């Protein structure tokens, strides 16, 4: 059990400190420099795993689609978070970033309410508990 809590605390520190590091690097590296270094660090960390599992991947990887997804999911998102840290502090940026899944669920629920006629009150309770935990 101690190992699980240690992993949770370690992941929390990595996630939370990334916003502090963005604030520190912003004056010297700039907005898109931070995005470049975050993408580079992620690639350096993940490439050995890809190399290790290369024999298990049977079909050809869709590199063009992966690059497009990477640009929008990582590059654009990290660029906007870095841009926001020019105006707000790291704590506010991390809380706004943490609320992204809740906003996605709420907006999706509102937009697709017509398609979900049998939704119970548990959905509202889930969204409310998510907001109250932030």
Image (cartoon, grey):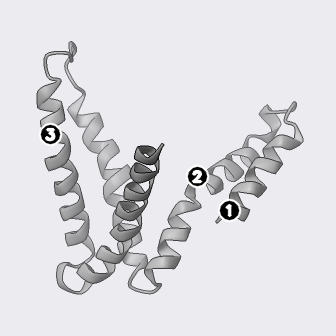
Mark 1–mark 2 distance (CA, rounded to whole Å): 13 Å
Mark 3–mark 2 distance (CA, rounded to whole Å): 27 Å
In the image, residue 73 lies at what x, y percent? 38, 50
Give the number of the mark in front: 1 or 3: 1
Mark 1–mark 3 distance (CA, rounded to whole Å): 35 Å
Looking at the image, tell me whether mark 3 or mark 2 is earlier in sequence order: 3
Give the number of the mark in front: 1 or 2: 1
Of residue 59 and residue 38, the one placed in the foreground of this image is 38
Residue drawn at (22%, 55%) of the image = 39
| Helix, strand or loop for disc 1 | helix
Quarter of the picture containing the C terminus is: bottom right
| Helix, strand or loop for disc 3 | helix
In the image, residue 8 lies at what x, y percent? 45, 52
**Residue under label 3:** 47
Is residue 37 placed above or below 8 in the rendered structure?
A: below
**Residue under label 1:** 133
Indicate the quadrant where residue 123 lies: top right
Residue drawn at (74%, 45%) of the image = 109
**Residue under label 2:** 101
In the image, residue 77 lies at what x, y percent? 39, 60
Which label number is shown at residue 82?
none
Indicate the quadrant where residue 25 lies: bottom left
Residue drawn at (84%, 35%) of the image = 119
């Amino acid at each position: 059990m101690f190992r699980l809590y240690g992993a949770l605390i370690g992941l929390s520190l990595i996630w939370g400190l990334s916003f502090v590091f963005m604030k520190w690097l912003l004056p010297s590296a700039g907005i898109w420099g931070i995005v470049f270094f975050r993408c580079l660090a992620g690639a350096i960390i993940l490439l050995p795993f890809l190399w290790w599992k290369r024999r298990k991947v049977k079909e050809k990887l869709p590199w063009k689609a992966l690059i497009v997804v990477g640009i929008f999911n990582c590059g654009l998102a990290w660029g906007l978070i870095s841009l926001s840290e020019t105006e707000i502090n790291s704590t506010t940026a991390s809380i706004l970033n943490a609320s992204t899944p809740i906003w996605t669920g709420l907006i999706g629920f509102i937009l697709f309410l017509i398609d979900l006629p049998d939704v119970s009150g548990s959905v509202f309770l889930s969204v409310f508990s998510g907001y109250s935990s932030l």
